[in-house]
Image: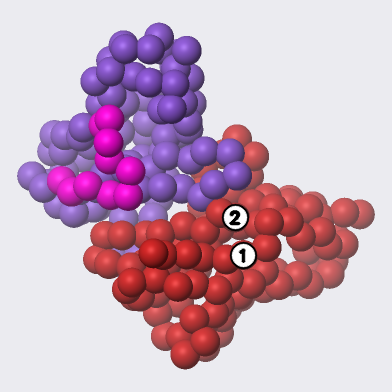
Chain colours: A purple, B red
Amino acid sequence: NAGVTQTPKFQVLKTGQSMTLQCAQDMNHNSMYWYRQDPGMGLRLIYYSASEGTTDKGEVPNGYNVSRLNKREFSLRLESAAPSQTSVYFCASSGAVQGYGYTFGSGTRLTVV
Amino acid sequence: GQSLEQPSEVTAVEGAIVQINCTYQTSGFYGLSWYQQHDGGAPTFLSYNALDGLEETGRFSSFLSRSDSYGYLLLQELQMKDSASYFCAVRTGANNLFFGTGTRLTVIP
């Protein structure tokens, strides 16, 4: 099925550990995004990539890095996880033909202890 | 700063109509979107308004008034499966979508 695939779905990290969240889309979208969602809050943009080879900071980029590996894949890396990074992470992609609608992946639930 | 205001919770009866309002104050404005999210699920795109007026998609309609910095989502013929959180989001730039904190809709029999 066409869409956005995220891995892993669940992860528990210890403070200071690192990990990479993977995201791939098969809709030939140029733009991809990483958001985090915390209880009682909306989604907040961490980083985005408007096209292959470009990345830009969003609203809450501190503590994260990203890589746009190719048109399909956009990864998010936590170099040294902190409890404040406990959240649900969503990857999304968009194409203008959708009326600027974003397609989201199923999310990664990350807990940092 | 940027802000989007929407009610935190709304309760409505199955078969009825409900309107979820959204007012915004942002540094840029390209359009207003609405997303649905069921508990434990991913947000799903519902609608996008770039121009003033009403957009209708089946049981869902979305309205925008740019002069009032205001929009709403209208859900008709409510069904139990419509119980979810609904987020308004403003496209503030070519690749910036700023989300509100969401409205939790509960549909009761």
Q: Identify the subunit bearing mark 1.
A: B
Label pair 1/2, CB-CB below 8 angstroms: yes
Residue for badge 2: B102
- Mark 2 Cα within 10 Å, few/some/many (few <14, many 20+)? many
**Residue at (51, 65) in percent of width and height:** B4
| Labels 1 and 2 positioned on one and the same chain | yes
Task: Name the foreground residue: B105 vs B98.
Answer: B98
- The magenta-colored residue range is A55-64
Residue B29: horizontal and vertical position, in percent? Answer: 35, 75
**Residue at (28, 18) in percent of width and height:** A80
Residue for badge 1: B6
Q: What is the residue that sits farthest to the front in this orientation? A: B1
- Is residue A84 left or right of A34 when viewed as pictured? right
Residue B12 appearing in the image:
yes
Image quarter (top left, top right, bottom left or bottom right) of the N terminus of chain A:
top left
**Residue at (45, 77) in percent of width and height:** B49
Q: What is the residue that sits farthest to the right in this orientation? A: B109
**Residue at (44, 17) in percent of width and height:** A112
